[in-house]
Amino acid sequence: MPALSIVTPVYNSARFLGEALDSVAALQAPHEHIVVDGGSDDGTVELLEARDDPSLVWISEPDRGQTHAVNKGLERATGELVGWLNGDDAYIPEALDRAVSYLLEHEEVGAVFGGMHVVNERGSVRRRYQPARYSWRRYLFMGDYIPTPSIVFRRSLLERVGPLDEAYADAADYDFYLRLFNAAAISRRPEALVRFRYHPASKSASAVEVQLREALEIRLKWARGPGQRLLMRGLDLLKRGVLLRITPWPKLYTRG
């Protein structure tokens, strides 16, 4: 039985998928890599067919989108630990191995997360980000300060909270990890675990308004009283009115 199951949802991802596959194959921890393809026609399937990796299992069939694909992968996961890596990102193998070892040695910890190297289309590092110390309350009010692809969690937590909610088009991960982290012991790793690719076609670049709208909807479900709802709405207005104008993120996918 693998110690770690990695789920990767893909659709027409041939351009970047090879790097993701290589980064998982380089892990020293016993693992399985479950790739769920939505019926690609860009060479993704041919790329998967050509791989000689006994830890790789994949399916290719129509699905209802990324969230459905992730849920299909989670259903197939057999490892004690689980990670979710999108097809245009890549792990930093040595760092992730250390995170897996930490979790296996500390049974009281339910999940870990770490930093990320933000890379552009060509793979050049444009930013190095290390998140603040863990706080469920901070995650609730600030959301995206924890890099989703850096998270590794115990499958027992998944069995407790259930799958991703397909009702959300772009914030299903946020809803899922809020539920997963609630009342669990979470540990921050002191290093980057993932290379996060920011490019024009990525959801992070193309669906910001959807992300913000859905994230606020999710937060409000957890609000305790009118004071928290007011604060949540105020922070949302701040993000929309100020942060979206001054953020450096749109410049990070240029070809520098």
Image (cartoon, rainbow, N blue to C red):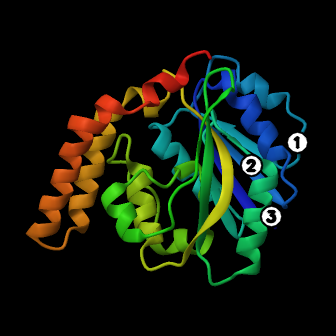
Taking the spot 35% from the left edge, 40% from the top edge, the residue there is 169
Q: What secondary structure is found at the residue carrying circle 1?
A: loop
Q: Is residue 200 visible?
A: yes
Contact (CB < 8 A) between labels 1 and 2? Answer: yes
**What is the number of the mark on residue 33?**
2
Contact (CB < 8 A) between labels 1 and 3? Answer: no
Q: Does 178 appear above or below 192? A: below
Q: Does 67 appear above or below 48? A: below
Q: What secondary structure is found at the residue carrying circle 3?
A: loop
* Residue 66 in the figure: left or right of residue 224: right
Q: Amino acid at mark 1?
A: Asp
Q: Quadrant of the N terminus?
A: bottom right
The percent position of residue 112, horizontal first and vertical second, equals 61, 66
Q: Which residue position is annotated with label 3?
A: 2
Marked residue nearer the N-terminal end (1 or 3): 3
Q: Does 20 appear above or below 111? A: above
Outermost front residue: 246
**Mark 1 closeness class: few <14, some 14–19, many ≥20 residues within 10 Å:** few
* Residue 233 in the figure: left or right of residue 136: left
Residue 22 sits in quarter: top right
The percent position of residue 254, horizontal first and vertical second, equals 55, 17
**What is the number of the mark on residue 53?**
1
